[in-house]
Image (cartoon, grey):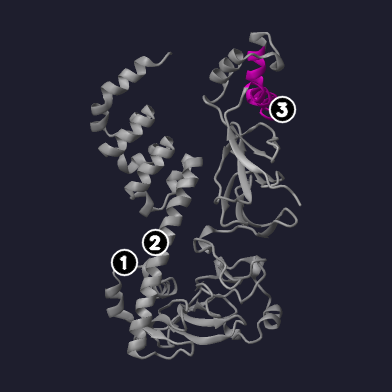
Amino acid sequence: MKEELKLINIIPDIDQYKLFFNTILKSNVEIAIRLEEKLSDLNKKIDGLSIEDITIIEEELFWKNLKIYNLVNKKDEFCLPFVYTNLFYDLGESPELFPLSKYDNQFLDIINKYGKVLYQDAYFVHLLNYNLIIIQDYDLNNNLYKYDSKSEELVFIAEEVDDSFFEFPIRFSENKLFFSNGYVNENFETQTPFCFDAGKEFNEGLAAVCLNGKWGYINHKSEIVIDFQFGDANSFENGFAKVFELKPEFQSENGNWIEVNSSKQHSHFNYTEDVFDVNFPQFPKQVKKPLSVIRKLQKNREESIEQYHFFAFGFGNKSFNLSIDTEKYGKWITIDKLGNLVNKEITIEADLEMKNRKARLDELDKEERFNSWLKKIINHSDLTFSVPDDLFLNREFVIKSIKENPKCFRHFSTYYSDDDEICEIAFNLNPDSYNYFSKRLKIVFLNKFNELQEELPF
């Protein structure tokens, strides 16, 4: 059985600096030329450098306070070349994969926990969970891979993948994940037709899916258990599900067919008609093509498309005022697995349980997202520009981020440049934050900044 290696971040000693310099000579042409010139000025070879020489070289050619990432075994032996100086981000306490970049190089090598280099020179990586990863290659194509821990290989899944295909965090439920327009299993093998507008987690054997702008439920065999008729639908819990029952005028079969999803269909999961019939003989043939119908006569095509998106992708994405939506389109009800409305007492109980469960999940998701994003930007401050709005406006998150990685402030300053508390924290940890202050705070901190500048040795 292979030994799992531990990722460490070290401040190099004199021997490790020499290893680093030797590696740089072989891997970075631009810095290698400058390093050779400096060695010539000192009239020394790398093996003969003293700690004073190394300090001079580091200050003139490299980042100050250089740190190096490496993988070590139980004997504390290093297993990677001394060249990796940045961990892009990891996904938790026991990650399978490490995206590491070499000194002065924006490209990333993806290395597993056994020290095997799985991919070289990725432009960007996005770890979706412990074994799913989107890799942006040199040509800026986003490709989806699955990491097979048995073979220690990255298995290609699909090309030209958009993050918007996924609901975060990535969770397989009952061995299924909604991806693009249908469901796959953990091996990314197709489990349903790929013709749906949207889909939610499988639970208790059923999944809420949207087809032609309306929601219904399918089972694991892709059989339609409850027809497509709702404005929105949630996963089943304890035999019940909350759905949005539309008013009769929005349930009408008359309407306009609008081609909305054909451009999103992914070639990796598309079928010819013959293959479709063999794999899913029970599924209605008229839904093979990604066409969506608005089940009400509209004045124009634009209004039809707007209403389609309103139902297909949920009220939450369209409006924050659900009471107005409810008055206009229908009402929320609770159904059983046969699609029948349950009695009022059970509805109230189910509603309460669903609200409590949602509150628990929301709190869990908030904590997970808080810690996950904090880890990301601690290791890579430029990711701060991608922080979700709710975290960007969370003062606790912002303050903690700046304390862990002061470089984050330059991105947060777009909103907090005139915030006395946050700017003072940022300045005390990194005086260069002064450059991102508002005009008012620059005046306040001017004397302190000038004093620090005078103390600098150069």
Tell me the quarter of the picture where residue 248 sits. bottom left
The tag on residue 26 is 3
Which residue position holds label 2? 363
Counting residues from the start of the chain, the first of labels 2 and 3 encountered is: 3
Specify which label sits upstream in the sequence, 1 or 2.
1
Mark 2 secondary-structure assignment: helix
Q: Give the main secondary structure of the magenta stretch.
A: helix
Give the residue drawn at x 36%, y 73%: 355
**Which secondary structure, mark 3?**
helix
Where is residue 220? Give x, y as percent: 60, 80
Looking at the picture, tell me which residue is in the foreground, 355 or 169: 355
Is residue 29 part of the magenta span, yes or no?
yes
- Check disc 2: other Cα within 10 Å, few if <14, some if 14-19, many if 20+: few
Count the marks. 3
Extent of the magenta region = 14-39
Q: Amino acid at mark 3?
A: Lys
Q: Which residue lies most toward the front here?
A: 75
| Residue 37 x/y as whole percent | 65, 14
Q: Earlier in the sequence, mark 3 or mark 1?
A: 3
Image quadrant occupied by the C terminus: top left
* Above or below: residue 95 compared with residue 292: above
In the image, what residue type sits under mark 1? Phe
The Cα atoms of the two marked residues, 1 and 2, are separated by: 19 Å
Helix, strand or loop under label 1: loop
